[in-house]
Amino acid sequence: MYRDRNQRDFARKLRCEMTEEERLLWRGLQRRQLGGLKFRRQAAIGAYIVDFACFDRRIIVKLDGGQHNDPAKRQYGEQRSAWLRT
């Protein structure tokens, strides 16, 4: 896994500034409430930060809001998704 200090600090900032949708989902994922699976929030995977990840089962959850309607951001999201699938 690739991690640098800036990425780690940015992930920490994102954990403090979760959207309402992220907070609602986190309430259901934290403390192994979903099938006993351990999820991490704002987890760094490679050069990307995903909203939630269960590393044991290789499950990634990324919530894309309205900001991803921009064509450039949509393309970035598609590239990120393709990389994460590999």
Image (spheres, rainbow, N blue to C red):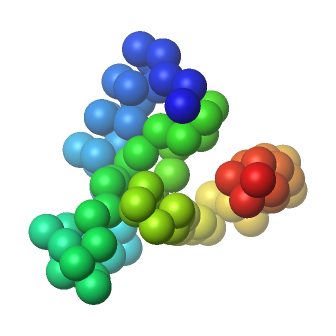
* Residue at horizontal 37 percent and vertical 73 percent from the top: 21
Which residue is nearer to you in this view: 57 or 25?
Answer: 57
24 left or right of 76 in image: left
- Tell me: residue 85, above or below residue 43: below
Residue 20 seen in the figure: no
Q: How many marks?
A: 0
- Tell me: residue 59, above or below residue 84: below
* Residue at horizontal 41 percent and vertical 14 percent from the top: 5
9 left or right of 57 in image: left
- Tell me: residue 76, above or below residue 27: above
Which residue is nearer to you in this view: 59 or 80?
Answer: 59
Q: Position of residue 34 (x, y in %)?
A: 27, 83
Q: Which quadrant of the view contains residue 78?
A: bottom right
Name the outermost residue toward the bottom: 35
Residue 18 seen in the figure: yes
1 left or right of 12 in image: right
Name the outermost residue toward the left: 31
Name the outermost residue toward the top: 5
Q: Position of residue 75 (x, y in %)?
A: 85, 53
* Residue at horizontal 29 percent and vertical 46 percent from the top: 15
Q: Position of residue 85 (x, y in %)?
A: 73, 59
Q: Quadrant of the N terminus?
A: top right
* Residue at horizontal 38 percent and vertical 36 percent from the top: 11
Q: Which quadrant of the view contains residue 47?
A: top right
